[in-house]
Image: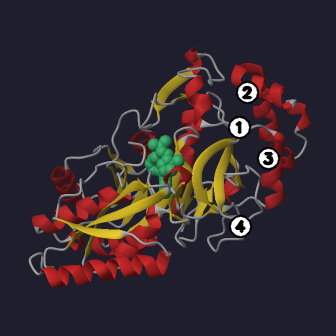
Amino acid sequence: MQIWDPTYECMPREEIEQLQLERLQATLNRVHKSVTCYRKKFDNAGISPEDVQCLADLAKLPFTTKDDLRLNYPYGMFAVPLREVVRIHSSSGTTGKPTVVGYTRNDIKMWSNLVGRVLTAAGVTHDDVVQIAFGYGMFTGAFGLHYGAETIGASVIPMSAGNTEKQIMIMQDYKTTALVCTPSYAITLASRMEKMGIDPKSLSLKTGLFGAEPWSEAMRREIENRLFINATDNYGLSEIIGPGVAGECEYKCGMHLFEDAFIPEIIDPETCEVLPPGSVGELVLTTLTKEAFPMIRYRTRDITSLDYSKCECGRTIVRMRKTMGRSDDMLIIRGVNVFPSQIEEVLFDIEECEPHYQLVISKEGAMDVLEVHIEVTENIFFDEMKKQRAFLEMVAKRIHSQLGISASVKLVEPNTIPRHEGKAVRIIDNRQK
Ligand code: DLL
């Protein structure tokens, strides 16, 4: 197995930390000088870049949130004049204005290299044919993976999202070996292949790089068993860079996070206190090399934990655990905290359940009430009421015994839960309405 950038991916810890400190100090000086929002934040907190003398001092700095980006829409957080920006992307925000992010020529080079590391860790090489099935556009997913794949010399098919049958035809004809998309779209592709009578084993596909949305280990098994590929996870967000923040190696024991480019911290999302290594909490990221759009202590809202132990692959950089989901998506059902991905884990282990589900949440008094909508395979008897009831009870019981929450489970007709080409919509939240 190869490592794209062994100098940075296998650096001894003391050296990584020294590099991080130097890059952090340079970044702080730069943002203090060129970004009004940061200067004001630092001044309000009574702190100046010179006060950061060691990595632990990072905790003295204020956080940056999505609200800061909204307030400074569109270019207020840029640290360079627009004439130095060669690319603009924006995040797929569902509410309000999107957030706008920019890259200098150097940023694009750095980004491409980081994504090159992700692809290499997943086992992709210059011999691979990589089909990008993310939507090209403002979303960072397609361009990020595209440039990364070109950087390592793979052959890139910029297919974009959707057009499922054509995707499959191209996979067959162009002999695609690596597929890049959301995990939910990989399931859609597998289902369509089955419908078209195409045996995935007859394709050249070997590897999948999936990301941009939370997905469970059960979903990984489902994808691997149906597409006969090695399914790997990779993580990123537009505010930080896009894809290329972290990616899995062949051992699949967490995603290696590129610490020469980002400093991760885990905080308690309620108290904002920094938690010790290994704790589960919200990931906070600081960029160390970005020129156009540096981020200081950005609150990602993603819930995960960090593992600093050595990985068998030889990389020394920290690993972040598969994220459980966003803190915004965490449900509190009768006092129990639960993420959609945990419910997914239960559903996918039930043979009759199709890998399509939706969670509908409403409020009864002060309580969240959860309805789980599932599709079942066509061979389950829709017309036999008794069997159907027993099946629904069994699913509800499994959810209760594994997660400790009560949910009412509803059966919906096959193919009625919308299929998405990008990020799947798993939650319908009726609480605010
Ligand atoms: O989704 C960047 C990306 C593209 C990552 C392609 C990986 C592959 P945004 O649209 O800004 O950027 O959404 C970022 O998506 O904060 C997470 O909540 C979620 N997310 C991204 N990757 C993963 C993952 C891209 N592997 C938001 N697992 C993040 C779970 C993920 N959630």
Label 1, label 2: how many angstroms apart (C-alpha)? 8 Å
Q: Quadrant of the C terminus?
A: top left
Disc 1 to disc 2: CB gap under 8 Å: yes
Label 4, label 3: how many angstroms apart (C-alpha)? 23 Å
Task: Tell me which amino acid carries mark 2.
Answer: Tyr
Give whichever of 127, 271 is nearer the camera.
Answer: 271
Query: For mark 2, what is the residue?
Result: 38
Classify 418 as above or below 196.
above
Q: Give the mark nearer the N terminus: 4 vs 3.
A: 3
Classify 122 as above or below 287.
below
Q: Give the mark nearer the N terminus: 4 vs 1.
A: 4
Label 2, label 4: how many angstroms apart (C-alpha)? 30 Å
Label 3, label 1: how many angstroms apart (C-alpha)? 17 Å
The spot of residue 415 in percent (x, y) is 17, 60
Classify 138 as above or below 174.
above
Other residues around mark 4 within 10 Å, as few (<14) / some (14–19) / many (≥20): some
Give the SS element for disc 2. helix
The spot of residue 270 in percent (x, y) is 68, 51
Query: For mark 4, what is the residue?
Result: 278
Label 2, label 3: how many angstroms apart (C-alpha)? 22 Å
Other residues around mark 2 within 10 Å, as few (<14) / some (14–19) / many (≥20): many
| Nearer mark to the viewer, of 3 and 1 | 1
Give the SS element for disc 3. helix
Residue at the spot 39% in from the left edge and 56% down from the top edge? 361
Task: Tell me which amino acid carries mark 3.
Answer: Leu
Query: For mark 1, what is the residue?
Result: 296
Which label number is shown at residue 187? none
Q: Quadrant of the N terminus?
A: bottom right
Task: Tell me which amino acid carries mark 4.
Answer: Gly
Query: For mark 3, what is the residue?
Result: 19
Give the SS element for disc 1. loop
Residue at the spot 76% in from the left edge and 28% down from the top edge? 41
